[in-house]
Image: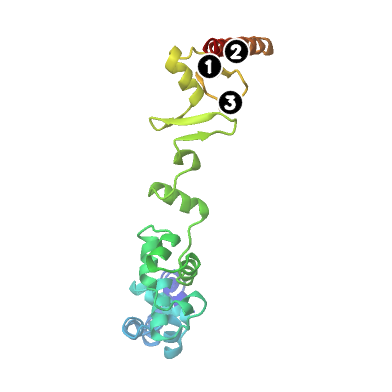
């Protein structure tokens, strides 16, 4: 009531009849504020004795909200993490759970590494020689909002701690069965590169067909270039037949060499 009168009374009552009377009431309210809410006493209890707002309110016989408003006006409000830390040091907060079993962990350092140092909970755990769950528990008790999965992954990617699966290896297989290789930082299909190394640039609108049907068999003899519009069963059958004749000729040459050696 008093705060409302102080915040709105001066402007509101000046427009009303009996403005002189209400101005006197406003001045009395301002005087009562100084008596009821001693700013110097609140500041001393909060900063020097490091009492929380609820204990200051109890000691002065005023509401906690009034104390917090005065502290906010003074610009000395502590964060939830700072309040928790002081409470633990002063013995007003009893440790439980992760804090109970790891009282030696420096909460201030943990909070600083996570928020300012952009470290993950796992990295902090390794730094202090404890578990990931312990660090997460301590951060929650400090009132620090944890990063969600997306934020954690983006941060890890920016700091070089994590890479997508398709960038971790130089040679991988995509979901269609083709082999992809890294060339100048980009992924390209291996069978196209193999064919182009022997025949030059692949014409526009052409594709590379795997004769034996195995998309990860990128031997040059298993690759055949053709216009995409001609990628029909009949032409593919012709390619397979040609490949079979080539293989049979090789086998015949090998058999002939064996007979010659025997003689």
| Residue 210 seen in this snapshot | yes
Residue at 34% across / 71% down in the picture? 75
What crowding class fits label 2: few (fewer than 14 Cα within 10 Å), some (14-19), or many (20 or more)?
some
Spatial CA distance of label 3 from label 1 is 13 Å
Query: On the image, which quarter does residue 35 sit in?
Result: bottom left
Query: To which residue does mark 2 refer?
Result: 243
SS class, disc 3: loop
In the figure, 163 relative to 70: above or below? above
Q: Residue furthest right?
A: 233
What crowding class fits label 1: few (fewer than 14 Cα within 10 Å), some (14-19), or many (20 or more)?
few
| Residue 25 seen in this snapshot | no
What crowding class fits label 3: few (fewer than 14 Cα within 10 Å), some (14-19), or many (20 or more)?
some
Q: Residue furthest front?
A: 263
Which comes before the other along the chain, label 2 or label 3? Answer: 3
Could you tell me residue 262's position as x and y percent? 55, 13
Near-viewer residue (9 or 18): 9
Spatial CA distance of label 2 from label 3 is 16 Å
Kindly report which numbered mark, 2 or 3, lies closer to the viewer in this rendering: 2
Query: To which residue does mark 1 refer?
Result: 221
C-beta proximity under 8 Å, tags 2 and 1: yes
Near-viewer residue (199 or 39): 199
Query: To which residue does mark 3 refer?
Result: 215
In the figure, 201 relative to 111: above or below? above
Could you tell me residue 83's position as x and y percent? 41, 76
Residue 69 is marked as none
Near-viewer residue (129 or 82): 129
Spatial CA distance of label 2 from label 1 is 8 Å
SS class, disc 1: helix
Kindly report which numbered mark, 3 or 1, lies closer to the viewer in this rendering: 1
Query: Which part of the image, by quadrant, shows the C terminus?
Result: top right
Which comes before the other along the chain, label 2 or label 1? Answer: 1
Near-viewer residue (113 or 203): 203
């Amino acid at each position: 009531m008093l705060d409302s009168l102080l915040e709105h009374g001066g402007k509101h009552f000046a427009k009303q009849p009996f403005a002189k009377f209400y101005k006197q009431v406003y001045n009395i309210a301002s005087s009562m504020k100084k008596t009821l809410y001693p700013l110097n006493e609140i500041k001393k209890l909060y900063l020097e004795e490091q009492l929380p707002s609820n204990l200051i309110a109890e000691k002065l016989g005023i509401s906690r909200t009034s104390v917090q408003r005065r502290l906010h006006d003074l610009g000395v409000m502590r964060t939830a993490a700072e309040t928790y830390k002081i409470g633990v040091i002063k013995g007003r907060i009893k440790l439980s759970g992760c804090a109970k079993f790891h009282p030696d962990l420096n909460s201030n350092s943990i909070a600083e590494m996570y928020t300012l140092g952009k470290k993950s909970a796992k990295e902090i755990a390794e730094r202090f020689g404890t578990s990931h769950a312990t660090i997460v528990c301590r951060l929650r008790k400090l009132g620090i909002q944890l990063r969600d999965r997306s934020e954690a992954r983006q941060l890890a990617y920016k700091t070089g701690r994590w890479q997508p699966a398709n960038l971790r290896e130089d040679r991988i297989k995509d979901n269609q069965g083709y082999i992809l290789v890294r060339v100048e930082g980009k992924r390209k299909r291996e069978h196209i590169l193999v064919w182009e190394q022997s025949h030059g640039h692949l014409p526009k609108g052409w594709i590379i067909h795997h004769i034996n049907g195995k998309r990860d068999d990128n031997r040059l003899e298993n690759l055949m270039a053709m216009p995409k519009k001609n990628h029909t069963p009949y032409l593919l059958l012709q390619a397979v037949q040609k490949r079979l004749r080539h293989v049979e000729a090789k086998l015949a040459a090998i058999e002939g060499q064996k007979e010659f050696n025997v003689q």
